Amino acid sequence: MNEEKLFKYLSFLKAECARHSYDGHIDEDEINQFNIEIRRFKTYVIESELISDSFKQEIYKVDFNLDETRHNRTQPKFLMWLIGGDIGKQHTEQENRKYRFQKLSNDIESLEFRLKAM
């Protein structure tokens, strides 16, 4: 992978984050598919001899982990739990997933700017 393909791949990952976070519902399959794509991207970066080590170091700094226990932004509100129970929990879960995808999209965009500045 050369630097041009690296930037195209980063744009693709950013677009996928936006697509998943803006469609209103993110299920486990979408998260798993995106995790597969992230692993593929990391493999290409590791195996590439055309990407400089400084680029690789910047890429390694980005937290691509979409694990639900690490990024929960909101906790279920007591009123939502009291009124909706499972519905409130599902709503909070979807909000947290959208937040994680939006955060990753912002992190990738920031990474693109840092790499272009190098």
Image (spheres, helix red, strand yellow):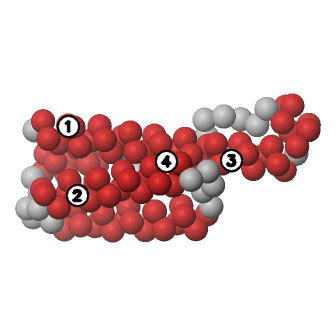
**Residue where numbered disc 3 is placed:** 93
Q: Position of residue 94 (x, y in %)?
A: 66, 48
* Position in image of residue 10 (x %, y %): 28, 53
Label 4: few (<14), some (14–19) or many (≥20) C-alpha neighbours in 10 Å: many
Residue 100 visible, this orientation: yes
Q: Are marks 4 and 3 in contact (CB under 8 Å)?
A: no
Query: At 29% across and 37% down in the image, what residue appears?
Result: 110
Q: Which residue is mark 2?
A: 8
Is label 3 in a helix, a strand or a loop? Answer: helix
Q: Amino acid at mark 2?
A: Lys
State how far apart marks 4 and 3 are (Cα): 13 Å
Find out whether the residues at labels 1 and 3 contact each other: C-beta distance under 8 Å.
Answer: no
The answer to whether mark 4 and mark 1 are in CB contact below 8 A is: no
Marks 2 and 1 sit apart, C-alpha to C-alpha, by 15 Å
Residue 48's mark? none
Does label 1 or label 3 sit earlier along the sequence?
Answer: 3
Residue at the image point whose x is 62% and y is 61% from the top: 27
Three-letter code for the amino acid on which mark 3 is drawn: Glu
The label shown at residue 114 is 1
